[in-house]
Image (cartoon, coloured by chain):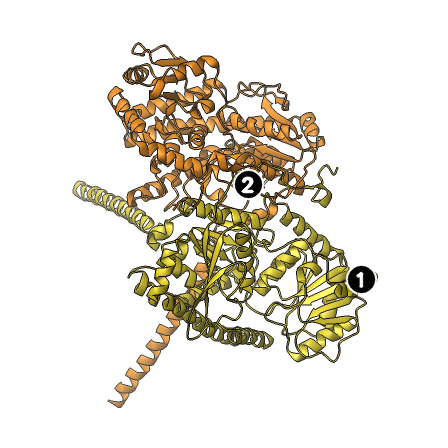
Chain colours: A orange, B yellow
Amino acid sequence: MEIFSIWSSALVIVLCSPLIITVCHSGNVLVYPIEGSHWINMNILIEALHARGHNVTIVRSDKSWYIKEKSPHYNSITVSVEETLDEKFIKELIMQGIDIQRGKISVINFFRMQIQLSGSFSKAHRMVSKMAESIFKDSMLTKGLQESQYDLVLTDPCWGGGTLLANYLKLPLVYNVRWLPVGEGHFAIAPSPLSYIPITGTGFSDKMTFTERLRNMLFYWLMLFQDKYLVRPHYQDVCHQYLGTGVDFYSLMQAADLWLMRVDFVFEFPRPTMPNVVYMGGFQCKPAKPLPQDLEDFVQSSGEHGVIIMSMGSFVGELPRDLAEEIAAAFAELPQKIIWRHTGERPETLGNNTLLVQWMPQNDLLGHPKTRAFVAHGGTNGVQEAIYHGMPVLGIPLFFDQYDNLLRLKQRGGAEILDIGTLNKEIFLQALQEVLHEPSYRMNMQRLSRLHLDQPMKPLDLAMFWIEFVMRHKGAAHLRTESYRMPWYAYHSLDVIMVLLAAVFVILLTAVAIIRFLCCRACKRKIKSD
Amino acid sequence: MEIFSIWSSALVIVLCSPLIITVCHSGNVLVYPIEGSHWINMNILIEALHARGHNVTIVRSDKSWYIKEKSPHYNSITVSVEETLDEKFIKELIMQGIDIQRGKISVINFFRMQIQLSGSFSKAHRMVSKMAESIFKDSMLTKGLQESQYDLVLTDPCWGGGTLLANYLKLPLVYNVRWLPVGEGHFAIAPSPLSYIPITGTGFSDKMTFTERLRNMLFYWLMLFQDKYLVRPHYQDVCHQYLGTGVDFYSLMQAADLWLMRVDFVFEFPRPTMPNVVYMGGFQCKPAKPLPQDLEDFVQSSGEHGVIIMSMGSFVGELPRDLAEEIAAAFAELPQKIIWRHTGERPETLGNNTLLVQWMPQNDLLGHPKTRAFVAHGGTNGVQEAIYHGMPVLGIPLFFDQYDNLLRLKQRGGAEILDIGTLNKEIFLQALQEVLHEPSYRMNMQRLSRLHLDQPMKPLDLAMFWIEFVMRHKGAAHLRTESYRMPWYAYHSLDVIMVLLAAVFVILLTAVAIIRFLCCRACKRKIKSD
């Protein structure tokens, strides 16, 4: 009995339920973004804020390579720095990751990877904290910032610069967040039992074996260690110098008014959350627009077989040569047409059915009725777009969270994952054929799409509502627990437990003493009477 | 610089942001409600479901005194039972509570109260589980229920009958919830550190002293004890008999698809929550309608002084005689007019300014511009209505959660609380004067009102959306962690911690053994060489 129409475009009605929204006059938003793919996300929020009549000012460095100085959507403040997270640094970091992944997976390799990455991350956090210091040292700049009467600071807490600036200016703080400086900040959001919440980077799901739970805990401690010795000290120094001695950087993060999380629970495993955490996963997704004519012609030429698209994300246009050859050779054997974002040398094994492009309208292609599968690296953006359009995925994760992102699709039956360390033509071809021809992949992804689209409000509108809420009420402190201000032993009730244990101990001791005393007396009496 | 219009009715725009909502065809909802004030809430949801075209069937007993058999909004199934939670039982329970509260507060009194209440509660849970049993025994009835192809069961989990029925019929389960069988079910919702989440009934806030934290933990254990020995066994028996041996009643509750909580975070202290918990606090509130002419005339006759309204909730029309006299005498000294819901004998001290009524349009009076204060018992409904209308409150809590509810207003500076044990004319008058004349009470309540009203969607619409979501997708399992299926020691990672401690112990022992061995060898050599 199908009594409900499950998400059908014919039945979508817009403006269905009365909304209570206060008109928000033009606000003044200070954005402290970070470079790279995270900027793509931030820019979507900036454009939406601009479209709603808010003034946006961004803070960038004079060495910024991704964030432009001029834009119709924002003004910019350029800070002069000695060094920055430039394209070269980021690409080197990525190539380090790929090289290590392609090596044999072993304990030694794991630690080599951790040490190498940790070094790079520590350097990055140092650069970021130096930029914040440059701002605080420049009294003209800080005076200007203070006088501009911003309503809030919007930042990505992946690096800590924005958090420092918001606190320096004593402004409400809104996070556009996927990561904290180290990992996902398990305990910054809500209590997160390690027994079913995997640390990102472990590649575990929410259902772990005993060994996986053990490794999850060890990984968590490693993360804490990295945080304590490699990340936090950089920010802590700036805290002490400019925000007051005794100010703890971690507490500044936990005091954020609002967390706009770039995931939702169609993607993420269910986990505890807090009232000031708003899940806006997929806020960047939109219905497909028509393709440019030449691309549309190429897509249509695929006939009934359809098209496969492949992209490894903003930073990996070019795979290692041998890998590219294997993949090209596999593609050449398929009846489908392929659109591949590949900026490196043209592989020799490339078939006539494969079109190499420098850039592709990924969202429009994912939403095209001819597209059959998406070969992807597993960045959060791409995975959310695949969910939005209900597209099966063949994942080739390269580094960081990409395996974990893809795992969330695989667990729901919407993706297969290949290991870049063992990848060759046969393995690639077989996995791709399965994703193409086994109908369950598409059915599962379309189920995820239906769940994702069935929300009371579009994620971007939700994000805008809550940003403007923080403007209207000058923060959102009533949604934030201040439990993080408690000493750790009190937060975990350790002092209470110790006192209770001590009380039990004293009671037991007293009982034992009384019993012994009575026994002795009884014995003595017996001896006397004997 | 006031650049934002803070919640002004002139600026409210309806239908502001595009909503994505799937049209939901007529659904078939089975409601298992409970008697008393909780039915008032459930009936609002039922009326809204009916208005949206859904068929609603309710399950009631042949001894129901509050839930009527016939209604234009629902069909009913009447189950024949031997005994039920009748009006007499509930009123006795309440009077027990008041009597104990008016006694001297002491440890003995506390335990007396606990034992008395526990006995009554255990009896109530037994009656509720017997009613479920009556249903399962009646094969004609269960066959009819199974054939009706309901889409979901909507129930209040305060008593466990609906939970049992939903699982018997294998239907998605939606909770309209303020309480679980014992307390607020701290750990059923999300991990809830006892260090900052007070157990309801303790009268603590989210900022506790060491002693309060200690008492909070002891109270939690007491609650667990009551649950284990007085509540759960009644349901557990029915579980084993009709749902399968090994089925745990608590797990059935934790497996609910959706929790519609009757609070929001303007009222409640911020706390961890879960993706399948929807906060719909204030869903019953609506703008005030005009008063009946005679009441409007009375209100207008108050002139500039305005009106005070007093109500002690659905079940307490009548206060103990001496208390009523004290309160009436205090009212008589005020220049305000008073509307008092009082069904008992007319107090001798009653002034001309006080109107006794059997029933009052509470919501319309709270939203009336002449109303100055609300004297209330602190039930969740009344407190949420006071927040909605921004009305200062003088609270006289009688039992259960009422002190805790009022505390949430007091902490935000919107209410004062009186102790019924020490209440007299002077104390009452002084507190009421303060609430009336100190402007901060009204300002704070109006701030809470602005925060409460500033939501992306009206709470009732949100509740409807999510109930229909469960219908459309046949549940909401993707929003629910299944961690509760883990053994308790695994959930808390105790097994992992034990193994790690053992490993550390073995390593230490080995190290000590090696050092001892080396030392011994060195000693022997020395002795030899000597």
Question: Is residue A488 left or right of A417 when viewed as pictured?
Answer: right
Residue that protrudes farthest toward the bottom in the picture: A529
Residue count near mark 1 (Cα–Cα under 10 Å), binned few <14, some 14–19, many ≥20 = some
Label 2: state its secondary structure.
Answer: loop
Question: Is residue B374 left or right of B333 when viewed as pictured?
Answer: left
Q: Mark 1 points at which residue?
A: B300
Answer above or below: position of A219 versus B404. Answer: above
Q: Position of residue B40 (x, y in %)?
A: 56, 62
Q: Position of residue B121 (x, y in %)?
A: 46, 71
Question: Is residue B398 left or right of A414 when viewed as pictured?
Answer: right
Residue count near mark 2 (Cα–Cα under 10 Å), binned few <14, some 14–19, many ≥20 = some
- Chain for mark 2? A
Which residue lies at the image location 37% right of the left edge and 49% below the top edge?
B482
Q: Position of residue A96 (x, y in %)?
A: 38, 22
Q: Quadrant of residue B289?
A: bottom right
Answer above or below: position of B125 versus B405. Answer: below
Residue that protrudes farthest toward the left in the picture: B528
Which residue lies at the image location 35% right of the left edge and 38% below the top edge?
A412
Amino acid of disc 1? Gln
- Chain for mark 1? B
Q: Mark 2 points at which residue?
A: A248
Label 1: state its secondary structure.
Answer: helix
Amino acid of disc 2? Asp
Give the CA distance from mark 1 to mark 2.
57 Å
Confirm whether residue B499 shows in the render: yes
Confirm whether residue B250 shows in the render: no
Label placed on residue B2? none
Which residue lies at the image location 43% right of the left edge and 25% below the top edge?
A366
Q: Which of B106 and B359 is in front in this view?
A: B359
Q: Which of B119 and A393 is in front in this view?
A: A393
